[in-house]
Amino acid sequence: MPLTDNKNYPSSLCRININKIDPSSFQSRKYFDENSLRELGASIAADGLIEPIILRPQKKGKFELIAGERRLRAVRKYTDMDDIQAKIIEADDLKARRISVAENQLRQDLSAIESIEATIKIIDVEMGRDPEYLTVGKTPLERVHKLLSKLDSIRVSKGNCYLVSDEAYNHFHKYVEMVESIFKNLPKPLKWQSFLVHDLVLLTDIPSKVQKASVKHSLNKAQTKAFAKLELVSEKAFHDVTLKNSIPFKDRNNELLAKPALNEFSAREIQVFAENLEKANQKKEQKKDESQQEMNTEIKIALMTRLGIPLVRIAQNITNQDLSSFRT
């Protein structure tokens, strides 16, 4: 059952003029594909809106969008409709943010990066009721990451029977119950330790350009981590794959096949592509080194020949250098 059908969010249905709707303050989605919006607009124009958007009332007869931005954009840009069916609810900022995230996650509408960022904002808003928490960092990501990292460090120390200071002990017991309660009641409940280890790393350890590409191509967590490996191996290959939204590959007959979209490749396939590219780059570097070494040898032979050094001594000199290099 969608979160917005819950009795905790009483609502009414009506048609609202699209010019009276302000954008959402809680939109988690960063990228909107125009072709997809065009198709959605054509579908709405032909068959109507299957599910209403969600709004909350504002001053002067205006409304703020909470959920359904793709539907609203499609109606505005690709239909002749002046109004849209909407569900009007009364919700404070926290409830509005939770509904926005839940609507997207229940439809699996968000990329992994967007979903993690949306979860961080919910945690930050709820934890922000504690003034001390707000001093932990300057941004929601920094605050959530530092808090969970500290809790995990204290948890591990306690588990290993290490000495924990009274301050750390009190800090742990002050926040751990709050954190566990928040994570239990997220639109998609999860463990905070898992979120710290498997989710936050996508924002703290992966370059922003990989994050942006992940959002644009709707990659999941595993795909994003594999894609970060590709960027590390070759910036050029990463740029080409991002631009073309696919990975080049051939069949057994060495013929190019039709290329699926990037998010249709498994994380393992992206990982293998990066590993093969890394091996190819290493072979190129090895050949380059060998070629440079051969060139250096030829130059040395030419110089020693011009100096009139006997060929026997030249051969001995080169052989000794090669053996020395081999031993090294």
Image: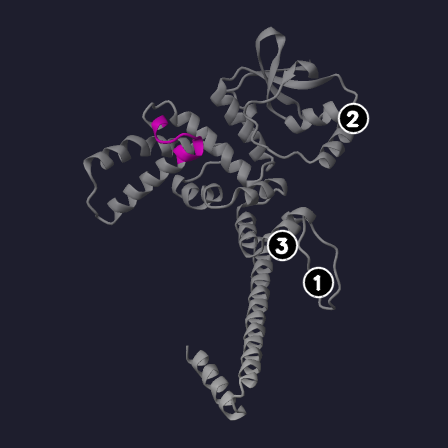
In this figure, which residue is indicated by the disc labeled 1? Answer: 250
The amino acid sitting under disc 2 is Ala
Choose mark 3 or mark 1, whichever is in front. Answer: 3
Q: Earlier in the sequence, mark 2 or mark 3?
A: 2
Q: Nearer the viewer, residue 234 or 193?
A: 234
Whole-angstrom CA distance, mark 2 to mark 3, is 41 Å
Q: Residue at x 72, y 34 (%)?
A: 34
Secondary structure mostly seen in the magenta stretch? helix
The amino acid sitting under disc 1 is Lys
Query: Does 266 appear above or below 299?
Result: above
Q: Residue at x 56, y 72 (%)?
A: 292
Residue numbers of the magenta segment: 134-144
Q: Nearer the viewer, residue 243 or 160?
A: 243
- How is this picture coloured? one colour
Give the SS element for disc 3: helix
Tag 2: Cα neighbours inside 10 Å, few (<14), some, or many (≥20)? some
Residue 50 in view of the camera: no
Q: Earlier in the sequence, mark 3 or mark 1?
A: 3
Give the SS element for disc 1: loop
Q: Residue at x 74, y 36 (%)?
A: 35
Give the SS element for disc 2: helix
In this figure, which residue is indicated by the disc labeled 2? Answer: 45
Task: Give the farthest residue toward the top.
Answer: 60
In this figure, which residue is indicated by the disc labeled 3? Answer: 237
- For residue 166, the mark is none
Q: Residue at x 58, y 80 (%)?
A: 298
